[in-house]
Image: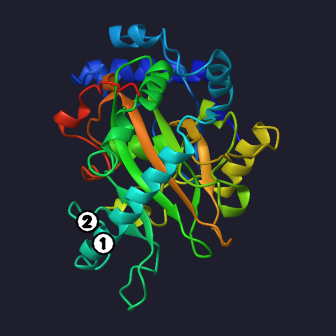
Amino acid sequence: MDTVTRSERDHMDSFAVAEAGAIGDSIEAIDRYPTRLQAPRDVLMERTDPVVWPARSEAVERTKSRQMLSHEEVEHFNRNGYVVRRGVFSAKEAASMRGDLSAACKRLVDEAKKCNGAVTEKNRVAFEKDRDGSDGSQPLVRSIFEVHKHEMKDVYRDARLVEAAMQLLGDDVYVHQSRANMQPPFVGSGFYWHSDFETWHAEDGMPLPRAVSCVVMLERNEAYNSALMVVPGSHRTFIGCAGETPPAHWEESLRTQKIGTPAPATIADMVERSGGNIAYCTGEPGDVLMFDANLLHGSHSNISPMGRTNLFGVYNAVSNVLGEPYAAPSHRPEHIAVRKPHWQQPIQPVLK
């Protein structure tokens, strides 16, 4: 499968700038990562932006003395698009977070039943597909959203996460999205291969891949209980996916995503480019996985007797706040993609 090269992208950008000038649009409005295309197949584009960004704020310079990420970890992230940091949180801290989430689940499940299992502004819970309790069975929680505003506020302000994100993004940061992800034993469903930035760009209006995901492991993550799979090096190629975004696509995509996912031939091509390499991001409670916004990743179903619970948070550079969606009829709601200015302010890291 062919890739649009950097020189071809530069030519396309210069043409777009000229076109924008002719119609009075701002250069910032130009879509540098087109996706959800009316095309017969996916289009691969060479990434034109950094992976590890140069520092642009005084806050980033001030945190350099602490260096949450070692030189080796930064190089691994830059080269592969991800890094697993060992022992960032203690086992005791991870157990405490897991206990808080368990209590929250019981409360939120009762609230969600009143909404028939739908994910809404008031109901931050997404259930496993066909296991929302509507048939009288016990509901199984798949995700709890907006945990950075509620149950896990202190975790997302922790310098061990915030300053590591600042180190990679070269900017002050805020939380674009947060959730607790559960993979219940035997029935936990997976997520098909995708790039998060493709969705954030298309449906949320995130301009550039200047964001990083942080996954705090609260239970053991192993291949057998659906640890995240990644394609190392795939963050260097943006996949413009074929197919238009239907209205309110987020209501379905939070359980099963079909639009905005690469075709099987594209995935096979990306794995081949990686030398046939697919990596499982395994770890112990308290370990933290950080991965680039554009990294191709996914997970399979969990048919093991061991569950998997993780905290997931996306740190976005304050210089990269959301605009209008690039390829969707309307933007996703606040509990999935933060747009309120109050919550887009730079996080002040808390040292512990």
Dot 2 or dot 1: first in sequence order is: 1
Q: Which residue lies furthest to the right in this view?
A: 275
Observer-nearest of 147 and 52: 147
- Checking the image for residue 123, the label placed there is 2
Tell me the kind of residue under disc 2: Asn
Q: In this view, does 281 lie to the left or right of 135?
A: right
The structure residue drawn at horizontal position 38% and vertical position 66%, both measured from the top left corner, is 126
Q: Is residue 236 left or right of residue 114?
A: right
Q: Position of residue 250 (x, y in %)?
A: 36, 59
Residue on which the image places disc 1:
118
> Which quadrant is the C terminus positioned in?
top left
Q: Position of residue 235 (x, y in %)?
A: 60, 34
Residue 280 appearing in the image: yes
Q: Is residue 78 left or right of residue 326?
A: right
Q: In this view, does 4 lie above or below 134?
A: above
Between disc 2 and disc 1, the foreground one is 2
Q: Is residue 193 above or below residue 112?
A: above
Please name the colour scheme applied to the rendered image. rainbow
Tell me the kind of residue under disc 1: Ala
> Which quadrant is the N terminus positioned in?
top right
The structure residue drawn at horizontal position 39% and vertical position 91%, both measured from the top left corner, is 135
Q: Residue furthest bottom?
A: 136
Other-residue count near label 2 (Cα within 10 Å), few / some / many at <14 / 14–19 / ≥20:
many
The structure residue drawn at horizontal position 47% and vertical position 75%, both measured from the top left corner, is 129
